[in-house]
Image (spheres, rainbow, N blue to C red):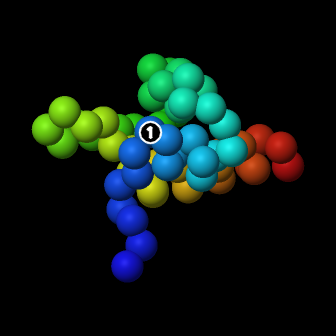
Amino acid sequence: MTKLLLSIPDAAKALSCGRSMVYGLMDEGAIQSVKIGRRRLISAESIERYVATLLAAAA
C-alpha cells in the first residue's frame, strides 16, 4: 500500500529538498498539508501536483 500522507522529512526526501523548503512551500500554498493530532502531514497527491506544475513550467 502506498502512503497517502507523508511526514515533513518524508516529503523533503520525495522532493529532494530540505525541511525548510517544504515548510516554505506550505506557507506559499504550493503544497497542502493536514494536521492529525500534533503531526503535520502532506498528501502524496499534493506533492505530485506540485511536481507536475514544475514540469509544465519548464516545458
The single residue placed furthest to the bottom in the displayed view is 1
Between 27 and 59, the residue placed more toward the observer is 27
Q: Residue at (33%, 43%) from the top-left corner?
A: 41
Q: Is residue 25 visible?
A: no
Amino acid carrying label 1: it is: Ile
Residue 53 to residue 22: above or below: below
Residue 3 to residue 46: above or below: below
The quarter of the picture where the N terminus appears is bottom left
Residue 56 to residue 25: above or below: below
Horizontal and vertical percent position of residue 31: 47, 37
For disc 1, the marked residue is 8
Q: Residue at (42%, 73%) from the top-left corner?
A: 2
Q: Residue at (49%, 49%) from the top-left corner?
A: 10
Left of 39 or right of it: where is 17? right
Between 4 and 57, the residue placed more toward the observer is 4
Horizontal and vertical percent position of residue 45: 45, 57
The single residue placed furthest to the left in the displayed view is 37
Between 21 and 53, the residue placed more toward the observer is 21
Q: How many marks?
A: 1
Left of 26 or right of it: where is 58? right
Left of 3 or right of it: where is 13? right
Q: Is residue 30 visible?
A: yes
Q: Quadrant of residue 7?
A: top left
Horizontal and vertical percent position of residue 53: 65, 45
Secondary structure of the residue carrying tag 1 is: helix
Mark 1 surroundings: few (<14), some (14-19) or many (≥20) residues within 10 A: many
